Image (spheres, rainbow, N blue to C red):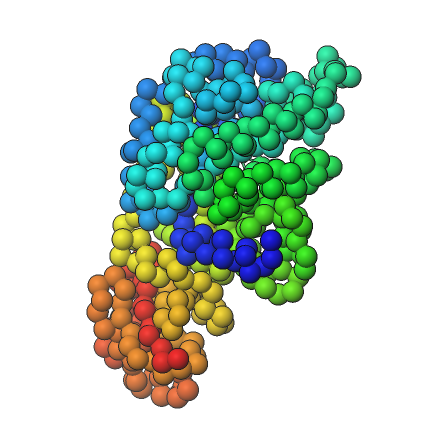
Amino acid sequence: MNQHERSEKVKWFQNDRFGLFLHWGLYAVPARGEWVRSVEKMPEEAYLPFFDAFDPADFDPAAWARMAKNAGMRYAVLTAKHHDGFCLFDSALTDFKSTNTPFGRDIVREFLDAFRAEGLKVGLYYSLLDWHHPDYPAYGDRQHPMRENEAYRGRAQNFDRYLDYMHGQVRELLTGYGKIDIMWFDFSYDNMCGETWRATQLIQMARSLQPDLITDNRLEGGGGYQGSLLSAQPSFFSGDFACPEQIIPPQGIVDALGRPVAWEACVTMNENWGYCAHDLNYKPAPLLVRKLVECVSKGGNLLLNVGPDARGNFPEQSVQILEQIGRWMRKNSASIYGCGNAQLPKPEWGWLTKKGNTIYAHILERSIGPIAIPPLGGRIKSMRLVRDGSEIQRIEAFNTTNFPGTTFINFGPGHASYPLPDPIDSVVVIEVEP
Ligand code: GLC
């Protein structure tokens, strides 16, 4: 796939900018995060009771989809299988699946139906690691729960059998569930990377089944490394977008030749992906709005995570955060969708996003006196506050006269300083002559 084909396929993704990540599975029951089995080196027998207890009576994917949509999200990615190996879909290749729990339902299918019905694009996360499958390396592996368990030393394993299983499940997801927009593989480490996963074959199969599908870069990357996607000649399975984890790249992301690369920062609301009952360290909604803006201003997306609990509910804090983000998005999403890097120096008071000849000034900080806007390289046709459409005037006052080359605006007349109309982010849309 050449650079051009890649950029065609990611167009919708780069337009939509804001998505929901959903981490859900058996780990919602112990409620200590999705790595609980690994962190606590928990044997399979200790984990299986969560399988028998999995019965999320409140599961309402239509309600989830509405919350995502109301927050201004345009796509969503659900964990079809996480590292623990538990499948949220009715795979013919395993018994370790949601349809065999007391709940008995194909969660992936219900998720896809509900989110598509709200007009969102849909993606599936699929863990390359598998701590349940007997042919996945256990003893001595870097993170397997049984990595130090002597009983697992020298256990007979046939990794090819695991790869057949893994490829088979990806085939199931890409054939039995309609159009999938994103496959989100997770993740590579050490020599568990690239062709160790039979990555060429996997991507060939995925493309033949779903030609428009886009994939992340973790068939050879991980949270902290991006594989060959950023090199001058990405590999066949380098993926279509980079996915920095729990960080926003300081300068956005370009490849070795300086070409911009599609990217998506995946970020938790608190400190865990899977539901964690004691983790109350939620990021405030205003911060998350500003971080979404920062991603867009650097040419990237934000994939914001929710970890539903064992009854199938979003944590109350997440519900409130999504509502608050939605309130801002309903007024200001024109400055997000279809927007990207304005290629102008970052202003001291916030960020710039841009769509064609339209520039959005995201003003986060009140000034002393009028607010200087950066030179925009064209004649300004109009300036309006996005949230109410009101005109923003150019200010010439006694305190601006020393700076004749600079354009000043204000949220009221004259030389004074005014409170910002939106304490989260006051967006001024500036139409510029080309
Ligand atoms: C990591 C973690 C994982 C999470 C993912 C999201 O690689 O292993 O738990 O699903 O990142 O980016």
Relative image position of residue 218 (x, y in whole percent): 60, 42
Residue 107 at least partly seen: yes
| Residue 304 occupies quadrant | top left
Residue name at image x 48 percent, y 20 percent: 97
Which quadrant, please, contains the C terminus? bottom left
Q: Is residue 152 above or below residue 207?
A: above
| Residue 93 occupies quadrant | top right
Instruction: Give the side of residue 417 with respect to residue 122, left or right.
Output: left
Relative image position of residue 338 (x, y in whole percent): 39, 60
Closer-to-camera residue (378/347): 378
Closer-to-camera residue (347/367): 347
Closer-to-camera residue (386/300): 300
Residue 21 at least partly seen: no
| Residue 101 occupies quadrant | top left
Instruction: Give the side of residue 83 with respect to residue 354, left or right.
Output: right
Relative image position of residue 375 (x, y in whole percent): 43, 79
Residue name at image x 70 percent, y 39 percent: 195
Residue name at image x 35 percent, y 44 percent: 120
Q: Is residue 288 above or below residue 126?
A: below
Q: Is residue 178 above or below residue 357?
A: above
Relative image position of residue 57 (x, y in whole percent): 32, 19
